[in-house]
Amino acid sequence: MVLSKYVARIMHPRPVSVIIGMSRTGEINGCSVSWFMPVNVDPFIFSVSLSPERLTYSYIKETKEVTLNIMPFRSVEKVHRAGSISGRELKNKLVELGFELESSSIVRVPHIKDALAYVEGILINELPFRDHSLMVFKGLKVYVDERYFRGNIFTEDAEVLLHVGGNTYAKPSNYARVE
Ligand SMILES: Cc1cc2nc3c(=O)[nH]c(=O)nc-3n(C[C@H](O)[C@H](O)[C@H](O)COP(=O)(O)O)c2cc1C
């Protein structure tokens, strides 16, 4: 098999979130990301692998503040659009796509009202590669919708949005509990 960017698909399905950043002049933009992960528990550190081609990347470099919004399956169409269109082509992209934004408490970047959970964070480090850059953030605040989070895990009816690859998405089902 030829190694290509598509080989990363063997590491899907994975949850999808929308990362939002702000330019130095206060413009807001965000895009869908599935290459994100927790890195450290205390302090809470998380990482997102973002291509420098994304407008969101440029905004994050300018002000360092972000929100990372974990999205439910019911938002699949909006999330797919946010990950297919650049804010360079569509001004005020998130609002135009129908995302409802709310003010955050610590960072100046808003979060998505319908998110199952979100983290407010600040860029603390970066490891650049050829087409993506691993951006490392310190979490300053975490919010989770407790209707869908019990015993420290998302319930099945949270329907966390998973990206399988291309335009194919899924939601977790058939939770199994091991004694
Ligand atoms: C489900 C999904 C997941 C994505 N994950 C990533 C990712 O982890 N990293 C990345 O750089 N781009 C990812 N993208 C692509 C960006 O979201 C896409 O290029 C977007 O249009 C960039 O928008 P912007 O230029 O407004 O920032 C993903 C797209 C989709 C649809």
Image: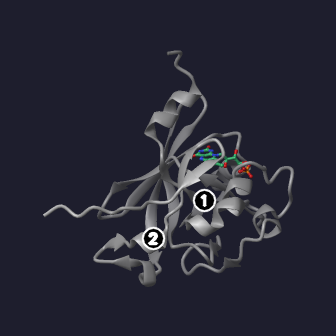
Q: Residue furthest top?
A: 2
Residue 86: percent from the left, percent from the top?
78, 50
* Camera-side residue of 8 and 142: 8
Of the two numbered discs 2 and 1 in the rendering, the one whose residue sits closer to the viewer: 1
Q: Quadrant of residue 110?
A: bottom right
User: What colour scheme does the image use?
Assistant: one colour
How dense is the environment of label 1, judged by Cα within 10 Å: few (below 14), some, or many (20 and up)?
many
Q: Is mark 2 within 8 Å of ligand 1?
A: no
Q: Is mark 1 within 8 Å of ligand 1?
A: no
Residue 98: percent from the left, percent from the top?
77, 71
In the picture, which quadrant includes the C terminus? bottom left
- Tell me what residue is drawn at x 58 percent, y 28 percent: 5
Circle 1: element type: strand
Seen in the picture, residue 115 relative to 90 is either above or below; the reply is below
* Camera-side residue of 76 and 152: 76
What amino acid is labelled 2 in the image?
Answer: Leu
- Mark number for residue 131? none
Quick one: label 2 or label 1, which is nearer the N terminus? 1
Give how far apart the Cα atoms at labels 2 and 1 are: 15 Å
What amino acid is labelled 1 in the image?
Answer: Ile
Seen in the picture, residue 129 relative to 101 is either above or below; the reply is above
Q: Are marks 2 and 1 in contact (CB under 8 Å)?
A: no
- Tell me what residue is drawn at x 51 percent, y 65 percent: 121
- Mark number for residue 140? 2
Visible in this render: residue 114? yes
* Residue corresponding to mark 1: 19
Q: Residue furthest left?
A: 179
Q: Residue furthest front?
A: 174
- Tell me what residue is drawn at x 48 percent, y 47 percent: 13
Circle 2: element type: strand
Q: Is residue 5 left or right of residue 143?
A: right
Q: Is residue 167 left or right of residue 72?
A: right
